[in-house]
């Protein structure tokens, strides 16, 4: 019983000290970075946004006196998340196939290789770029760059048939009511 | 003792100096104003007021959030405090929005308007309004083009009931087959789509009409009543700067086009130039505006968009304009 407990304790210690290392690195890397592009609160100053996201990689002045600032940000790495599963899976498989003994003999040999991959993954995370528009007063006005020029002919939403009928009920006389509904139906192309 | 008195006097002087410098800093600081607007050349008064420092000269630090969709813009503006202080919006959207939030929202000036930019393009052979009778006429329903089509028909003794309206976006005029027997007889659209259709379809189509004489599409400057109450004098200064921007823009087409190129990107400035050519700067509330909105209110009522008759007294607030540019307010405005 005692040797078996000692074996389990030793296995646990080895896993924590070596086997868990790659998993821990992958896990930490999988939690770092932004899952979605960062969106600082509108109205913040350039300094406040810089403090949050670092110095912009590019700044383009705008004719209104404002500027477009491009920031690089660390993205959440899906490969790191996969790495956690892979690392745990490999150690689990080693333990399963060798009835636990592999954790003492094989895992310490495999772990440096896994750790190398984990460190490489953590050191090379994917990066995204995000642009913000700052106004002439240096405050964050909008996410992204100003939209492209475009004459718009915006339309208001058509009232529902029920609203049209209801609105025409002010006409007490039936003919006037029918005329009112027919006129509105024609304007909104309702058959 | 003398030393003690001297030290106290020094401290008092220091505090006074700090207080004075803080006060001076507060006075020097420009009033921050956030305007929401669409990227249209009709807003060139804003563009020039920004780039030429006219806002700054009025002690205003104006930032403009440019938004493509008028509906999105009003959604943001409708959020209140952080949504923007002023909004630059089209006439239909403004009246519609006003109805939904009345009596809090008011329009303080028309910035610009456009009649030549709204066109009716008809098949060859359709030479007047009567020739459209019982035929399909395409437009974006609920848009300024649709309203101006309604005005065109009414001016010729007709209405939407005399034609068969088709709900089409302006871009579909480019896919139009004017030769098809069952196709639309005409499109009522906003430029540059009319000019593009004329170029594409050649002799098969022609310019039936512009909106000149029937009405105008507008860009209006609106704000919250409570903003006017809480920030006395800001709207007046904004209007003065915008008027300087309007005058400058009228004389400096190249700078307007360059602003659009630098601000909104793209090398094709044809649309900017066309809009610039057909827009009239206003920065006022004149008789034409009053008459156009009487007609618009009537059409919106007829379309079932208004639940009560349009009330210009509640929709327009000419007070800031009257205080800053009194000659720009027509007597029709209360």
Image: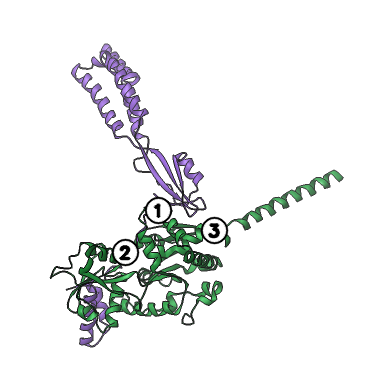
Chain colours: A purple, B green
Q: Position of residue B85 (x, y in %)?
A: 47, 62
Up-down: is B12 above or below A157? above
Which residue carries the number 1 mark? A146
Q: Which residue is mark 2?
A: B192
Crowding at dot 3, Cα within 10 Å, few <14 / some 14-19 / many 20+, comes out as some
Tell me the residue that label 3 is attached to. B53
Q: Are marks 2 and 3 on the same chain?
A: yes
Could you say which quadrant of the image residue B270 lies in? bottom left
Residue found at the very far left of the displayed protein: B181
Closer to the eye: label 2 or 1: 2
Of the two numbered discs 2 and 3 on the same chain, state the one appearing first in sequence.
Answer: 3
Q: CA distance from mark 3 to mark 1?
A: 20 Å
For label 3, the SS is: loop
Between tags 3 and 1, which lies in front?
3
Chain under numbered label 1 = A
Q: Position of residue B80 (x, y in %)?
A: 43, 61
Q: Quadrant of residue A178?
A: bottom left
- Residue at 30%, 20% in the rendered image: A19
Mark 2 to mark 1 CA distance (whole Å): 21 Å
Residue B311 against residue B76 in the figure, above or below: below
Q: Seen in the image, is B205 located left or right of residue A50?
A: left
Q: Is residue A11 left or right of residue B20?
A: left
The answer to the question of whether label 2 and label 3 lie on touching residues, with beta carbons closer than 8 A, is: no
Please state the chain letter of the residue tagged with numbered disc 2 in the rendered image: B
Element at label 1: loop
Give the SS element for disc 2. Answer: loop
Q: Residue at x 53, y 77 (%)?
A: B327
Mark 1 residue crowding within 10 angstroms, few (<14) / some (14–19) / many (20+): many
Image coordinates of residue A146 in percent, x first then y, are: 40, 53
Q: Residue at the top extreme?
A: A3
């Amino acid at each position: 019983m005692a040797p078996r407990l000692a074996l389990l304790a030793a296995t646990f210690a080895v896993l924590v000290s070596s086997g868990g290392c790659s998993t821990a690195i992958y896990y930490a890397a999988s939690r770092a970075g932004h899952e979605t592009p960062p969106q600082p609160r509108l109205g913040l100053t350039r300094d406040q946004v810089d403090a949050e996201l670092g110095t912009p990689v590019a700044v383009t002045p705008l004719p209104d006196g404002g500027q477009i600032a491009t920031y690089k940000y660390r993205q959440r790495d899906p490969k790191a998340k996969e790495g956690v599963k892979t690392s745990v899976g490999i150690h689990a498989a080693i333990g399963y196939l060798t009835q636990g003994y592999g954790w003492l003999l094989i895992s310490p040999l495999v772990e440096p290789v896994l750790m190398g991959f984990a460190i490489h993954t953590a050191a090379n995370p994917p990066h995204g770029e995000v642009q913000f528009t700052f106004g002439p007063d240096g405050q964050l006005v909008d996410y992204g760059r100003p939209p492209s020029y475009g004459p718009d002919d915006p339309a208001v939403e058509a009232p529902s048939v029920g609203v049209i009928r209801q609105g025409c009920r002010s006409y007490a006389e039936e003919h006037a009511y029918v005329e009112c509904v027919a006129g509105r139906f024609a304007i909104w192309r309702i058959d | 003792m003398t030393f003690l008195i001297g030290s106290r006097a020094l401290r008092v002087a220091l505090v006074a100096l700090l207080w004075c410098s803080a006060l001076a800093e507060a006075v020097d600081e420009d009033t921050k104003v956030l305007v929401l607007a669409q990227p249209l050349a009709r807003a060139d008064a804003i563009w020039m007021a920004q780039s030429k420092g006219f806002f700054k000269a009025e002690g205003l630090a104006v930032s403009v959030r440019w938004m493509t969709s008028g509906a999105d813009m009003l959604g943001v503006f409708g959020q209140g405090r952080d949504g923007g202080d002023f909004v630059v919006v089209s006439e239909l959207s403004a009246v519609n929005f006003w109805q939904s939030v009345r009596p809090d929202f008011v329009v303080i000036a028309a910035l610009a308007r456009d009649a030549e930019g709204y066109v009716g393009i008809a098949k060859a052979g359709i030479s007047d309004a009567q020739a459209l009778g019982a035929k399909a006429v395409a437009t974006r329903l609920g848009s300024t083009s649709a309203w101006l089509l309604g005005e065109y028909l009414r001016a010729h003794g007709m209405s939407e009931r005399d034609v068969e309206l088709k709900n089409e976006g302006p871009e579909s005029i480019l896919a139009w087959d004017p030769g098809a027997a069952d196709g639309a007889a005409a499109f009522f659209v906003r430029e540059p789509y009319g000019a593009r259709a004329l170029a594409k379809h050649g002799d098969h189509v022609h310019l039936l009409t512009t909106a000149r004489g029937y009405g105008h599409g507008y860009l209006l400057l609106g704000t919250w009543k409570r903003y006017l109450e809480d920030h006395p004098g800001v709207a007046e200064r904004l209007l003065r700067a915008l008027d300087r921007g309007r005058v400058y823009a009228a004389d400096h087409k190249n700078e307007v086009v360059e602003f659009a190129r630098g601000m909104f990107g793209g090398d094709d400035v044809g649309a900017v130039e066309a809009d610039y050519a057909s827009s009239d700067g206003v920065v006022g509330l004149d008789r034409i505006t009053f008459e156009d909105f009487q007609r618009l209110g009537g059409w919106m009522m007829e379309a079932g968009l208004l639940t009560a008759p349009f009330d210009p007294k509640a929709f327009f607030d000419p007070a800031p304009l009257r205080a800053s540019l009194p000659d720009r307010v027509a007597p029709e405005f209360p």
